[in-house]
């Protein structure tokens, strides 16, 4: 099984002061390290958030965060999944169930994991799965 790491998981893994840092590392050591993925959306999210000057434990500008990403991508078990699906594709989305702008990105990541035969690993306990066929089975709550 390959797990697409949600932005919240990536942040928790790279930020030692993050409230869920230990939880993320325990899961990664136990399960995630065997097969995990990033995609353009999650990589950019990590860099944008942690590289923001107001992020509490930022290592510096986005260029500094890229180095953390390079380290993660260099670990054995890493796969890169390109963005290859569309929210408009009925095979991956029940778009009529997209009732809120806040569901779009999470639903996309869940569908991307599903389309690659993997699961979305997230700390988001309220992620809606009904927008993606087999969405519940494609979700790994940490």
Image (cartoon, helix red, strand yellow):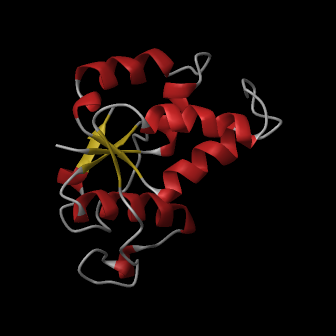
**Above/below status of 114 relative to 25:** below
Give the number of callouts: 0
Up-down relation of residue 108 to residue 18 (above or below): below
115 sits to left or right of 28: left
Q: Residue at x 37, y 79 (%)?
A: 95
In-image side of 43 versus 75 (left or right): right
The vertical placement of 100 against 40, above or below, is: below
The residue lying toward the viewer, choosing from 94 and 28, is 28
Is 93 or 24 nearer to us in this picture?
A: 24
Direction right: furthest residue: 53
The residue positioned 43% from the left and 39% from the top of the image is 73
Q: Compared with residue 18, is residue 123 higher up or lower down, i.e. above or below?
A: below
- Based on the displayed image, in which of its 4 quarters is residue 56 positioned? top right
Question: Residue 24 at what x, y percent from top left?
Answer: 41, 24
Q: Give percent across and percent down for residue 110.
A: 33, 58
Question: In which quadrant is the C terminus drawn?
Answer: top left
Quadrant occupied by the N terminus: top left
**Residue at horizontal 42 percent and vertical 36 percent from the top:** 123
Left or right? Give the position of 56 relative to 90.
right
Task: Estimate the x, y position of residue 84 in percent, counting from the top left.
Answer: 37, 72
The residue depicted at 73 percent of the width and 28 percent of the height is: 58
Q: What is the x, y in percent for residue 2? A: 23, 44
């Amino acid at each position: 099984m390959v797990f697409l790491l949600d932005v919240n998981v990536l942040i928790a893994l790279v930020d030692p002061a993050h409230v869920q840092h230990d939880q993320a590392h325990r899961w990664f050591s136990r399960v995630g390290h065997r097969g995990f993925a990033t995609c353009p959306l999650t990589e950019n999210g990590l860099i944008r958030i942690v590289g923001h000057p107001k992020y509490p434990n930022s290592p510096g500008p986005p260029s500094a965060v890229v180095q953390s990403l390079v380290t993660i991508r260099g670990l054995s078990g890493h796969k890169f999944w390109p963005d290859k699906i569309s929210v408009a594709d009925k095979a991956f989305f029940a778009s009529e169930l997209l009732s809120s702008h806040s569901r779009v990105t999470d639903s996309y990541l869940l569908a991307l994991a599903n389309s690659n035969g993997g699961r979305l690993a997230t700390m988001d306990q309220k992620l809606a799965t009904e927008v993606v066929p087999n969405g519940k089975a494609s979700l790994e709550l940490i």
